[in-house]
Image (spheres, helix red, strand yellow):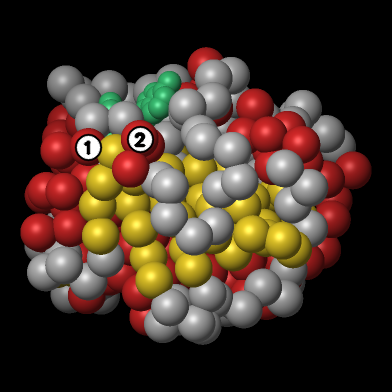
Amino acid sequence: MNTIDQYAVFGSPINHSKSPRIHRLFAEQSHQNLDYVAQEVTAENFVTAVTEFFAQGGKGLNCTVPLKELAYRFATQKTERAKAAKAVNTLALRPDGSILGDNTDGIGLVNDLTVNHGIVLKDKRVLILGAGGATRGILALLLEQKPDCLIVANRTAEKALQLAIEFNHSFDGCGFDDLHDQPFDLILNATSASLSNELPPLPENLLAKNGVCYDLAYGNTPTAFVRWGKLQNASKSLDGLGMLVEQAAEAFALWRSVRPDTKAVIDLLNTER
Ligand code: ATR
């Protein structure tokens, strides 16, 4: 049995994950004695790997693509925000041996937008591009911010419409072709297009004056969507590095009952790009 508390991130592919670096920085900063590693785990071997991890004394896990729905099913208890997302990015061993599933993606995004970047969402017009797992993870927390309107637009319009039904029409779903309404104050890219350096097909004049663009994906060079935002004269065109650090901080706080200083870590990672 290890004497140092063990944590890990599971996913596939996982070799470029920044999570071990982020959690080790948090641990160093808050004097927590723990180790955190990245482990390549596919959907096929998820249950075996996670069972083994906790059987060997592991304390907590992050789960990323393509494992978040499987982690949701594995958790024996779930937070409300995990239930809303039907996806889990954080598993925590509880003192009674049960496994709590949480989803810290939405709070990570909202904290990055509102705290780190001073962006107010209340009464604003917000557009989310994409209707997949990434969107699911952020919807509930964005709605809590009481935007004036929230629209989810997807390449496959039907998927966005279905998502709106699932969330009791608390937002509208549509296809990209239907986006000829008033411009938006905040456009979030939650498609996986950035991963292949592609851009969803977007109409002109979609972004309001002084509007903000935010890509949930991140990279060492600006993503296609971040570049698009700059071309649209966005007041800020941001990628998801801040969200990554903030969601990690929420997981760390759940595991260790200590809230790390995210700003120091974001600043450091930005210098390493
Ligand atoms: P994730 O967990 O990253 O959200 P996902 O659940 O597979 O992954 O969802 C991917 C999302 O990105 C979907 O909304 C997908 O649109 P479709 O539902 O029409 O497939 C969207 N997407 C992926 N590549 C895209 C592209 N090149 N242009 C526009 N949307 C894209």
Looking at the image, tell me whether mark 2 or mark 1 is earlier in sequence order.
Answer: 1
User: In this picture, is 2 found above or below 170?
Assistant: above
Nearer the observer, 21 or 213:
213
Q: Residue at image x 52%, y 51%?
A: 188
Q: Quadrant of residue 185?
A: bottom right
Q: Disc 2 marks which amino acid?
A: Asp
- Amino acid type, residue under disc 1 in the picture: Ala
Residue 105 lies, in percent from the top left, at: 43, 58
Task: Decide which of 105, 93 is in the foreground and name it.
Answer: 105
Question: Secondary structure beneath disc 2?
Answer: helix
* SS under mark 1: helix
Residue 125 left/right relative to 22: left
Looking at the image, residue 123 sits to the left or right of residue 237; the answer is: left
Q: Are circles 2 and 1 on residues that touch, CB within 8 Å?
A: yes
When the figure is inspected, residue 253 is found, relative to residue 269, above or below; the finding is below
Classify mark 1 as within 8 Å of ligand 1 or not, answering yes or no: no
For residue 177, the mark is 2
Residue labelled with disc 1: 157
Q: CA distance from mark 2 to mark 1?
A: 9 Å
Q: Is the residue marked by circle 1 packed among few (<14), some (14-19), or many (20+) residues within 10 Å? A: some
Residue occupying the point 11% across, 69% down: 168
